[in-house]
Image (cartoon, rainbow, N blue to C red):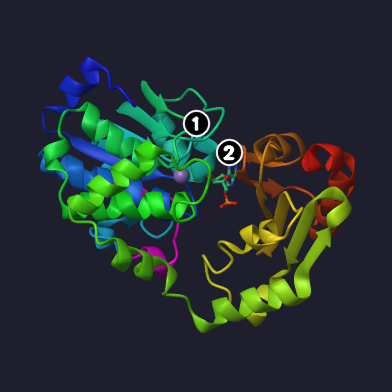
Amino acid sequence: MLQIHDTLKSILNSPANIVITTHQSPDGDAIGSSLGLMHFLLQMKHKVNVIVPDAYPPFLQWMPGNSTIINFSDQPDIAQKYISESAIIFCLDFNALSRIKQLGDLIQKSNSTKILIDHHRQPENFTAYSYVDINACSTSQLIYEFIASMEKIDLINKHIATCLYAGIVTDTGSFRFPSTTADTLRIAAHLIECGAENALIYESIYDNYSENRLRLLGYTLQHKMEVYKESGAALICLSNNELNQFAFTKGDTEGIVNYPLSIEGIKLSVLVLEKDGVIKLSLRSKGKFSVNDMARKHFTGGGHANAAGAISTLSYNETIQLLKNLFKQYAEEILK
Ligand code: 5GP
Ligand code: MN
């Protein structure tokens, strides 16, 4: 369980201007942990602004407080103003300023007291306080532990509970990944007692897809999933053209990379997306093979042992070729 420093506890006990930031292309845990912490800090009488680097999908835009989130790419001046007025900046669900692009420069230059709360591997040292637990299922669980360590568990209201529950559900693959522990389930149970409506939250996230999104999934599994049984690996590549055919919007490919892992004997799955000239990789594994290591060693990326992301500086076709070579090279380790 996360234990916060006494000095930080006393800093947070007097009202201040606070900014909360999270990683680019925010996911459910990024938004859930940020808004969950925001509602907690509001209860503590702080003035709080959540700033995200860029847009996030509609199926994450329903959480309480969503309308107050500032998107840096749309409103850089307002974001800059809030950062310059802040005394404290929380950095949630990412561990390197490069993960938040230009917003990272502003945060680096700011003299505010910075606090990192995260669960990714190999954090960089850019904050005065750092609470990193790489075994935690989600940053949202760490926010719950943070509140507990502040001895303010009684302040958890329906808003906080809803946001943190949404973050935990999304980052645990609905409580199925190995990072789900007895503590996770105890915390989730308590969040339900505090007002989180579990069925409604699940529905808001997962039963809210566009028709195009489901058809893209069908097309991908039928036509684009390449299975390399001898390496225990699978590859899905989607080009700009293909994404456009399905009127791709942010979030539409989320979760696709997990499907090949449901094939018996497949322990590594990689999704390559060509989006506006950027080649983005999502890597997932089952068991001991570390996709964090693969993403760091062969691409510019990182994440967790079983879930990582990266950007490739090679072309779309070169990236695909490199991945096929890596499957052969690592076959023994993948299959272990
Ligand atoms: P996803 O495949 O869903 O984009 O990301 C999987 C995990 O890897 C997430 O926890 C995410 O924070 C992390 N991740 C994604 N892209 C990158 C990246 O470019 N660099 C690093 N260091 N981590 C990433
Ligand atoms: Mn997370």
Q: Name the spot of residue 66 as percent of width and height, x first.
A: 28, 60
156 versus 6 height, above or below: below
Question: Looking at the image, which is closer to me, 133 or 67?
Answer: 133
Residue 246: in sight, yes or no?
yes
Q: Secondary structure at mark 2?
A: loop
Question: Vertical placement of 56 versus 217: above or below?
Answer: above
Tell me which residue sits at (44%, 60%) in the image.
Answer: 55
Can you see residue 76?
A: no
Residue 98: x %, y % from top left = 54, 38
Q: Earlier in the sequence, mark 2 or mark 1?
A: 1
Q: Is mark 2 within 8 Å of ligand 1?
A: yes
Q: Residues within 10 Å of mark 1 (few under 14, many from 20)?
A: some
Which residue position is annotated with label 1? 134
Q: Quadrant of residue 44?
A: top left
Q: Which residues are magenta?
A: 50-62
Q: Specify the farthest residue to the top.
A: 6
Dot 1: element: loop
Which quadrant is the C terminus positioned in?
top right
* Residue sitting at x 52%, y 65%: 251
Quadrant (top left/top right/bottom left/bottom right) for the N terminus: top left
Front-most of 198 and 4?
Answer: 198
Can you tell which mark lies on residue 53? none
State the count of labels.
2
- Residue at mark 2 to residue at mark 1: CA–CA distance: 8 Å
Q: Position of residue 42 (x, y in %)?
A: 15, 44
Three-letter code for the amino acid on which mark 1 is drawn: Ile
Q: Which residue carries the number 2 mark?
A: 304
Instruction: Judge by depth and name the residue closer to the eye, 38 or 1.
Output: 1
For the point 32% across and 52% down, the residue is 165
Asked if disc 2 and disc 1 are in contact, CB closer than 8 Å, the reply is: yes
Q: Amino acid at mark 2?
A: His
